[in-house]
Amino acid sequence: MVTLDEVKQYLRIDFDDEDALLEDLIRTAEKICADVLRTDDVNQVYDFPNGKTAVLYTIAVLYDQRTDADLHMLTLTLRAFLFGDRKPVF
């Protein structure tokens, strides 16, 4: 699992004002990555070699581009990260 402290370190955030937002983004990123992997269990994301990196990357995109995130490009990038572990069907 990705912790709030890991996310804050990854994003280089040293204040607590947006902790609630970051916790929401963690859950959202885990769900997005699970969907790309075609699994219903978000915890399985972390079983794969690139899972944690994919979650952190997703959080960074959602955080940095909150007003105009290109979700199509995000999904394509995540597919590249996770392609080798992606299930053939949902």
Image (cartoon, rainbow, N blue to C red):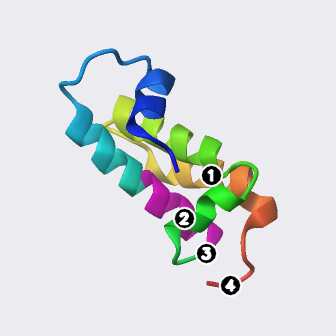
Rendered position, 69 above or below 90: above
Q: Amino acid at mark 4?
A: Val
- Main SS of the magenta part reads helix
Residue placed at 61% from the left, 67% from the top? 44
Q: Which of the 4 image quarters holds residue 13?
A: top left
The percent position of residue 36, horizontal first and vertical second, equals: 59, 65
Comes first in the chain, label 4 or label 2? 2
Comes first in the chain, label 3 or label 1? 3
Mark 4 vs mark 2, CA separation in Å: 18 Å
Q: Which residues are magenta?
A: 29-37
Taking depth in this image into account, of 27 and 75 the one nearest to the observer is 27
Q: Amino acid at mark 1?
A: Leu
Q: Secondary structure at mark 2?
A: helix
Q: Amino acid at mark 2?
A: Asn
Comes first in the chain, label 2 or label 1? 2
Residue 60 shown in magenta:
no
Residue placed at 32% from the left, 38% from the top? 68
Q: Amino acid at mark 3?
A: Arg
The percent position of residue 66, horizontal first and vertical second, equals: 30, 37
Question: Closer to the observer: label 2 or label 1?
Answer: 2
Residue placed at 50% from the left, 53% from the top? 72
Q: Which residue is mark 3?
A: 38
Comes first in the chain, label 2 or label 3? 3
Mark 2 vs mark 1, CA separation in Å: 17 Å
Q: Which residue is mark 1?
A: 78
Mark 2 vs mark 3, CA separation in Å: 12 Å
Q: Which residue is mark 2?
A: 43
Q: What number is the disc on residue 89?
A: 4
Q: Which of the 4 image quarters holds residue 28?
A: bottom left
